[in-house]
Image (cartoon, helix red, strand yellow):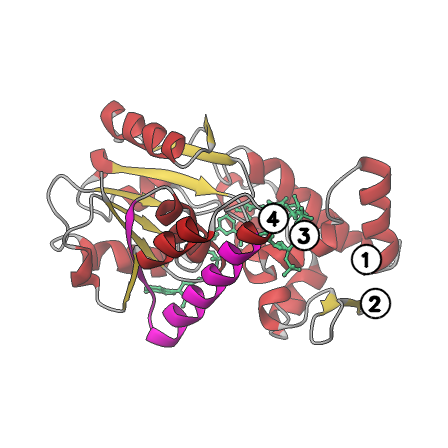
Amino acid sequence: MQTIGVIGAGLMGNGIAHVAAQAGYDVVLSDVAMERCEAARATIAKNLARQVGKAVLTQDAADAALARISLTTMAADFASADLVIEAATENEAVKIQIFQGMATLLKPEALLASNTSSISITRLAAATGRADRFCGLHFFNPVPLMALVEIIPGLATSPQTTAAMQGFAARLGKTAILAGDAPAFIVNRVLCPMLNEAIFALGDGVGSVTDIDTGLKLGANHPMGPLTLADFVGLDTLLSIMRVMQEGTGDPKYRPAPLLVKYVEAGWLGRKSGRGFYDYTGAEPVPTR
Ligand code: CAA
Ligand code: NAD
């Protein structure tokens, strides 16, 4: 494997491109508009510079990683890729359209993966025309700092494809776990209901943003409070995950908190939109409730 394609240059796509380039792969990074690709490259440059600043990477290695990343808006530029990782918006219709568009463009032997947080890998695989060479490959945010990758084989994923994903994760320096193809897999099945519950608690007036976040940070030793983490993940993404869990299991315990729905309706998506449970427009985040 030498060339990795990454579809979607948002929060996760830029992180996946970053770690793949840092591991020595050539990376083709795409989005719907070149400005988004350029913004992702600027973020990657900033994050590589942080690593140089913390002395975990040399300047030469950072420069070489950035030089390995090329940008495109054309799916045809994935023709040389050995592995393409889809990291577009958490919306099944969007992902299926991407996979159907790629079907005839990829090399026959190329592997395809989705970084979906929650959607059925088996169902997505059916749209790819290469279900045996398709797998879930779930990274965590922020990708350069988070050690885990979940590998989720679908019903038709071949053992060779799963093994190739394990080899890829190892070359990135990540620890891989195998997860079953159930809604939200392992980590998000446990984590996202906790974030959703924190939003219920806020909506019910049980505590302020600061008290809920301080509570979980100091009372449960979480590195970020749940409302900070929800903003960090993206409230639109969290809402999509909760809906997939609710619809996929039929269990009402996964219903999204009404306040989460309202925030997404308002376009308050967390850090990426400048406002969520905190306001990010100033030098420091300011709690909004
Ligand atoms: N690349 C990218 N981002 C980086 C980075 C790098 N090399 N180095 C730091 N960051 C980011 C942080 O997110 C944060 O952003 P701002 O400075 O812009 O505010 C900042 O840089 C913090 O940097 P620090 O050097 O202070 O980092 P830290 O040592 O305090 O650790 C953290 C930060 C690792 C994110 C820690 O707070 C943490 O572990 N938080 C919880 C993260 C978590 O739970 N992630 C999983 C989310 S769920 C998920 O990903 C799955 C899903 O499908 C939704
Ligand atoms: P994001 O909103 O930051 O970025 C999504 C990007 O996909 C946007 O730049 C958008 O323009 C692009 N996009 C949409 N349609 C596209 C298309 N047809 N072709 C190419 N690009 C397209 O979202 P994100 O947080 O990076 O999430 C991406 C995926 O990763 C989702 O499936 C999400 O569930 C998953 N994920 C997210 C997190 C997280 O913490 N945010 C963690 C792990 C996995």
Please report contact status of discs 2 and 1: CB closer than 8 Å, yes or no: yes
Q: Is residue 123 visible?
A: yes
Q: Is mark 3 within 8 Å of ligand 1?
A: yes
Image position, residue 82 (x, y; %): 20, 43
Q: Secondary structure at mark 1?
A: helix
Label annotation for residue 54: 4
Instruction: Give the alpha-carbon distance from disc 2 to disc 1, as whole Å.
Output: 8 Å
Indicate the quadrant containing the N terminus: top left, top right, bottom left or bottom right.
top left
The amino acid on which the numbered mark 3 sits, given as a three-letter code, is Leu
Disc 1 marks a residue whose amino acid type is Leu
Q: Report if residue 77 lies within the magenta region.
A: no
Which disc is residue 289 wearing?
A: 2
Residue at (70% x, 61% y) in the render: 258
Badge 3 local density, few (<14 within 10 Å), some, or many (20+)? many
Q: State the CA–CA distance, disc 2 to disc 3.
A: 16 Å
- Disc number placed over residue 202 in the picture, else none: 1
Which portion, as a residue range, is magenta?
25-50
Label 2 residue near ligand 1, CB within 8 Å: no
Q: N-terminal of the two: label 4 or label 2?
A: 4
The C terminus sits in image quarter: bottom right
Q: Which residue is mark 3?
A: 229
What's the distance in space between the residues labelled 4 and 1, CA to CA? 36 Å
Ligand 2 quadrant? bottom left
Q: Residues within 10 Å of mark 2 (few under 14, many from 20)?
A: few
Residue behind label 4 places its C-beta within 8 angstroms of ligand 1: yes
